Image (tube, rainbow, N blue to C red):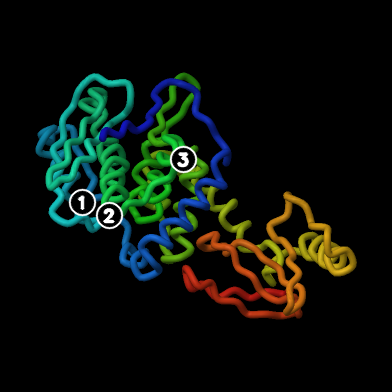
């Protein structure tokens, strides 16, 4: 089976957060597949020195060195990567056979854009990891978004965001996520592991995208019923809660991050965990401390 990863060079770059629901589902799926302990085994991101690639380095030996560093970082057991270059439509592709050798082909343009070889390899080697884990989403688009998200969340995807460059006459981006979505995933990771990936960026555009993504990630932390929610959110929540009690058959609508449920134990509210997006259900009874069973985040709620 062959995978081809997306990359754009010169064409307009899509911005914003059009894939956010799929990204959040990917983070949830990752936690479910490898567990809290598995995710926390990647607490240290790939360091820039492991992906550094100077123009004077031998093309093939340098590619093998970076690939080996990524294999180790992603905890792949004895997976030897053979890297080649050829003319192709996509940025890169990988043969997902049984192993123990995996064949990665990179677009010929990386012969002269060596600083981005690590980014292309990070995406492809994450495909190998997901193949071994048996973790995939249906459809090429969603599966590629899963791959980008996992690459970033496990500490190698900052390379993909750093490959984003854009000016008045040209642009380059690797991966299927928008730059801001890469920033969002990196910020979600940073909040869990208390790190600042922005210090590694060499691209000013990458830093700007990370800043926007981080702002979006922080908004996940101040939505009702979390106690950190702002005044406007709390006011809307109180109205929706009152409506749910008075009219059990109605709901707050699709534009809010919570839903009310009636049961034998009374009214409950469900909402997405701000860390892993797993749905959490708690009773509506004022101040409640909830603990996500998937990512173990402790949440202070005012229900």
- Helix or strand or loop: what does disc 1 sit on? helix
Closer to the eye: label 3 or 2: 3
Judged by depth in the image, the label closer to the viewer, 2 or 1, is 1
The disc at residue 47 is: 2
> Residue 267 in the image: x percent, y percent?
76, 73
- Closer to us: 99 or 152: 99
Q: CA distance from mark 3 to mark 2?
A: 28 Å
Q: Classify residue 103 by image quadrant.
A: top left
Q: Which residue is mark 3?
A: 142
- 248 vs 45, left or right, is right
Q: Which mark is residue 71?
A: 1
In which quadrant will I find the C terminus? bottom right
Dot 1, how many residues are within 10 Å of its Cα: few (below 14), some (14-19), or many (20+)? many
Kindly report the distance in space between the C-alpha atoms of the residues bearing marks 1 and 3.
Answer: 23 Å
The numbered mark, 1 or 3, whose residue comes first in the sequence reads 1
Counting from the top left corner in percent of width and height, residue 114 is at 23, 33
Number of marks in the image? 3
Element at label 3: helix
Q: Earlier in the sequence, mark 3 or mark 2?
A: 2
């Amino acid at each position: 089976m062959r995978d081809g990863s997306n990359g754009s060079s010169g064409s307009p770059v899509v911005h914003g957060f059009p894939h956010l629901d799929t990204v959040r589902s990917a983070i949830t799926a990752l936690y479910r597949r490898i567990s809290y302990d598995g995710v926390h085994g990647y607490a240290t991101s790939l360091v820039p020195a492991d992906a550094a690639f100077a123009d004077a380095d031998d093309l093939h030996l340098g590619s093998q060195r970076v690939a080996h560093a990524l294999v180790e970082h992603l905890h792949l057991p004895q997976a030897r990567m053979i890297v080649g270059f050829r003319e192709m439509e996509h940025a890169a592709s990988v043969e997902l056979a049984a192993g123990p050798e995996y064949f990665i082909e990179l677009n010929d343009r990386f012969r002269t854009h060596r600083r981005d070889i690590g980014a292309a390899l990070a995406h492809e080697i994450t495909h190998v990891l997901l193949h071994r884990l048996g973790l995939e989403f249906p459809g090429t688009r969603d599966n590629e978004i899963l791959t980008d998200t996992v690459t970033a969340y496990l500490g190698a995807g900052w390379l993909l965001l750093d490959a984003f460059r854009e000016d008045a006459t040209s642009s380059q981006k690797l991966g299927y996520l928008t730059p801001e979505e890469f920033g969002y995933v990196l910020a979600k990771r940073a909040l869990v592991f208390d790190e600042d990936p922005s210090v590694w960026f060499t691209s000013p555009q990458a830093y700007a995208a990370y800043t926007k993504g981080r702002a979006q990630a922080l908004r996940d932390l101040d939505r009702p019923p979390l106690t950190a929610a702002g005044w406007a959110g709390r006011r809307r929540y109180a109205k929706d809660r009152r409506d749910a009690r008075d009219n059990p058959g109605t709901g707050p609508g699709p534009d809010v991050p919570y839903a009310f449920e009636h049961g034998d134990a009374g009214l409950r509210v469900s909402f997405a965990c701000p860390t892993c997006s797993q749905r959490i259900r708690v009773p509506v009874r004022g101040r409640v401390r909830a603990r996500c069973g998937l990512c173990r985040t402790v949440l202070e709620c005012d229900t």
